Amino acid sequence: MLQKAPRRTRERILELSLRLFNEFGEPNITTTVIAEEMNISPGNLYYHFRNKDDIVNSLFAQFEEEIGRILTVPDPRSSNIENVWRYLHLMFELIWRWRFFYRDLNDLLSRNRKLELHFKQILAHKIKVARELCIDLRAEGKLEASDAQIDATATNMVVVATYWLSYEYVRNPRKYTEQQAMADALARGCYQVLSMLAPYLRGDTHVLFESLSQDFLKNLN
């Protein structure tokens, strides 16, 4: 029977670093801590990564590739409000997997020029997707809003999505990593983002949104 090849040390370092950064915050984790948790020498770690920023940049490259795939998938961006809701869940689940980037965002950007430039591009791309969604809804008569209202709403949706997990952490830091608390936090984030469209929705789309909202509020723990 073929045995699965062991993961390379570099991959294990990245996997462990992501877990530690997510659980304790990137500023609180040093390369020494990572090496100790890996049960390897600091020299072995530095053979694979020059410093902690090198680890962060490697993780960001993986994150950027993953979020790039979501932002270019056409189906979830369809103007069907149920598909939009599902798409937001996918986006929030991705944000949760890479939550240290969002929770420690200001600190990271203040000292990492690469992250600063690339994260700006990601935010701009998110706003573009949100804006296109609104324009599609308007073209189909499901949304009534001016260009200025659409621009503001798209920006607000991205702002809330970007900082939602930080808000949830402040609300209840002791339960932040509990599975059910996390699931509820992601669901609330989806609802909060999508609710920004509610004042502009028309016809059956508005009725469907209200129905989805009632089901969500009923099932939320």
Image: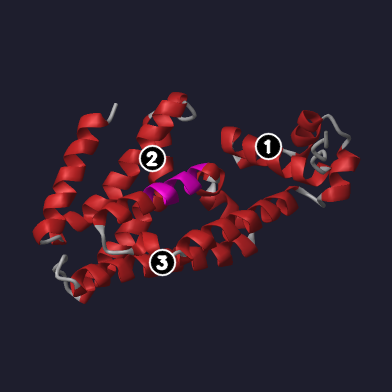
Residue 99 located left or right of residue 86: right
**Residue type marked 3:** Pro
| Of the two numbered discs 2 and 3 in the rendering, the one whose residue sits closer to the viewer | 3
- Residue at 65%, 58% (x, y): give it: 61
Mark earlier in primary sequence (1, 2): 1
**Residue type marked 2:** Leu
Residue named by callout 3: 74
The stretch in magenta equals 88-96
Which of the two residues, 122 or 67, is positioned nearer the viewer here? 67
Q: CA distance from mark 2 to mark 3?
A: 22 Å
| Of the two numbered discs 1 and 2 in the rendering, the one whose residue sits closer to the viewer | 2
| Of the two numbered discs 3 and 1 in the rendering, the one whose residue sits closer to the viewer | 3
Mark earlier in primary sequence (3, 1): 1
- Residue at 50%, 44% (x, y): give it: 103
Residue 60 figure quarter = bottom right
Residue named by callout 1: 29
- Residue at 31%, 55% (x, y): give it: 83
Residue named by callout 2: 186
Residues at marks 1 and 2 touching, judged by CB atoms closer than 8 Å: no
Q: Examine the residues drawn in magenta and state their main secondary structure.
A: helix
Q: Secondary structure at mark 2?
A: helix
Q: Secondary structure at mark 1?
A: loop
Q: Report the quarter where the C terminus lies.
A: top left
Residue 214 figure quarter = top left
Residue 100 located left or right of residue 182: right
Instruction: Indicate yes or no whether the magenta region holds residue 55.
Output: no
